[in-house]
Image (cartoon, grey):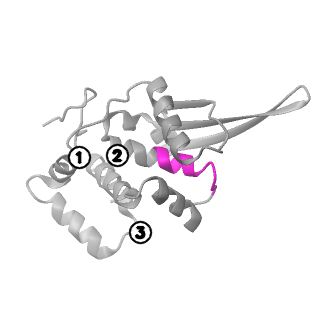
Amino acid sequence: MKYLAGYPPALLAQVKQQMETATGLAGMLQKRYPSAHEIRTDRALYDYVNGLKSDFMRNAEPLSKVAFDSKLHVIRNALGTHTTVQRVQGSKLKTKREIRVASLFKEVPEEWLRMIVVHELAHMKQRDHDKAFYALCTHMEPAYHQLEFDLRLYLTHLDAGGERLWLADGSRTQ
């Protein structure tokens, strides 16, 4: 249960117990999150992220690119990244900001997509995972910590050999 490292032993025991039930983590997660979102393209993701950014971070610099990245989870062991690239063009310094989201998030509930987008947007103001960073995350998504935990449960389910729970068309697999 590498995705749950750092959680208290009592909570880990509850997760193990849930995994041993007939429905396991899959049943619990599908009951809590019945369907996947409909955001499938990079353009739709860009619009979604900019919508959240305009709601909560109007003064932040604009994003140059937002995209799903199929290599992200495997190569960088991350679910999302934010980058700032500065280039000199003539006498001006141009800054480009990008957010990349692991393609795993194409087939998950909208709440989890929102959680990862909120996380990456928060990095635009706060670089480190400190108290101010998580305060900003919970300002943009009050259920941030619960959503992150549930996503970790899903990753644990997948790591244990479980199937993906939502299909690309937004329906459930079972």
Magenta residues, start to end = 117-127
Q: Is residue 106 magenta?
A: no
Image coordinates for residue 21, horizontal then vertical, percent: 10, 59
Q: Amino acid at mark 2?
A: Glu
- Of mark 2 and mark 3, the one earlier in the sequence is 3
For disc 2, the marked residue is: 111
In this picture, residue 26 sits left or right of residue 11? left
At a point 25% along the width and 38% down the height, the residue shown is 164
Residue 74 in the image: above or below residue 41: below
Secondary structure of residue under mark 2:
helix
Image coordinates for residue 34, horizontal then vertical, percent: 20, 42
Q: Are marks 1 and 2 in contact (CB under 8 Å)?
A: yes
Secondary structure of residue under mark 1:
loop
Q: Nearer the viewer, residue 24 or 113?
A: 113
Q: Nearer the viewer, residue 105 or 48?
A: 48
Marks 1 and 2, how far apart at CA? 8 Å
Q: Are marks 2 and 3 in contact (CB under 8 Å)?
A: no
Is residue 33 visible to the viewer in this orientation of the structure? Answer: yes
In this picture, residue 121 sits left or right of residue 155? right
- Of mark 1 and mark 2, the one earlier in the sequence is 1
Q: Residues within 10 Å of mark 1 (few under 14, many from 20)?
A: some
At a point 39% along the width and 60% down the height, the residue shown is 145
Image coordinates for residue 41, horizontal then vertical, percent: 42, 24
Is residue 69 visible to the viewer in this orientation of the structure? Answer: no
Q: Residues within 10 Å of mark 3 (few under 14, many from 20)?
A: few
Q: Is residue 120 magenta?
A: yes
Residue 33's mark? Answer: 1
In this picture, residue 58 sits left or right of residue 11? right
Residue 52's mark? Answer: none
For disc 3, the marked residue is: 6
